[in-house]
Amino acid sequence: MLGAMFANIIASLIRLPVAGPNRLRPLVAIVIGVMLGSSFTPALFDHITLWAPSLILMVVYLVAAALLVVPFYRKIAGFDLSTAYFAGMPGGLMEMMIIGKDVGADERSIILAHTARIVLVVTLVAIWFRVVQDIDLSDRSQFGIPFSEIPEHELIILAIVGAFGYFLGRFLRLPAPMLLGPIIVSAAVHSLGIIHNPPPRELVIIAQIFLGTIVGCRFVGTEPKAILRAIGLGLGATTLMLILTFSFAFAFYQMFGQTIEQLVLAYSPGGLAEMSLVALAMNADIAYVASHHLLRISFVMMMAPILFKFVSRADNDLKK
């Protein structure tokens, strides 16, 4: 994933004629969604109540992150209030862009800010695990079971789960429907013990490559100067968020009965799919990590528009 992502970012900077495989994006999201859902096994319910304190503290983390990053984009980047607010909120890229656009924010600045955040968080966290923790993230044995070892009837069920989840997500108008729909349906069939295997390893690896390409190609068509500025600002914002992430991880990992690595993955404000794939490469508890990112995306999507009304009103009162 990282190799494809960086190759396409570099290609964008030097203006090579590259384009993301956007037509394949639904298939990539479905494969990753079914894979993430497969981590919700029947044994998970024995542990899920133990996650409650960590999930509750995630809300505190999100508030603290917003209080750090929104002023950063307002004061350092010079963004207007609405653009700084939705660029600094650690939510989903598409959701923050759509909601921000509706209140008059600069759509392009929001996209660049969130793309830079996802790229930098995934990169810096992966480097930390590889260099500091000496964890081999390239071990493909962690990426599931080979195609040939999965029973044919389970392969058929996995395909049905992915297709049904895709349409369910769109029907329910979920955030990131192509990803969340398959996660929900896959989690249901795996937690009920109907099937036991994740998608084939080969599909997961291909999906990672395409996901890295799609993320890297988000910079295509943007001036190199704007890309470098977005990455520079993103580095500042990401540094603030990761300092907060590591502070929470080191302060609370013993209280939550988790490893520092698990909390770093769960609290790092990268993308749901991207951070879950890093967790997969580390052989970490994907369900634990994915649950925290689902909460992050859902909470920010629900609360950000409501809180913005109060923030905007307070800003207008100060100007009077």
Image: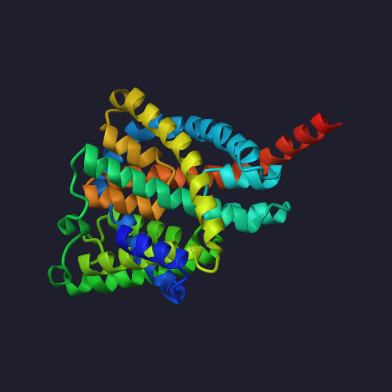
The residue lying at 49 percent from left, 63 percent from top is 218
As drawn, which residue projects farthest toward the right?
A: 320
Percent of width and height locating residue 103:
72, 51
Vertical order, 19 against 223 (above or below): below
Residue 271 appearing in the image? no
Vertical order, 191 against 133 (above or below): below
Q: Nearer the viewer, residue 56 or 118?
A: 118
Residue 220 appearing in the image? yes
Q: Quadrant of the N terminus?
A: bottom left
Vertical order, 56 against 102 (above or below): above
Percent of width and height locating residue 220:
50, 67
As drawn, which residue projects farthest toward the left?
A: 149
Report how many numbered discs are placed on residues in the image.
Answer: 0
Q: Nearer the viewer, residue 212 or 193?
A: 212
Q: Quadrant of residue 249?
A: top left
Q: Nearer the viewer, residue 26 or 251?
A: 251
Percent of width and height locating residue 265:
34, 41
The residue lying at 81 percent from left, 36 percent from top is 316
**Left or right: 255 with respect to 228?**
left
Vertical order, 287 against 165 (above or below): above
Percent of width and height locating residue 55:
42, 35
The residue lying at 32 percent from left, 72 percent from top is 159
The figure's colour scheme reads: rainbow
Q: Quadrant of the C terminus?
A: top right
**Left or right: 183 with respect to 154?**
right
Q: Nearer the viewer, residue 4 or 145?
A: 4
Q: Quadrant of residue 107?
A: bottom right
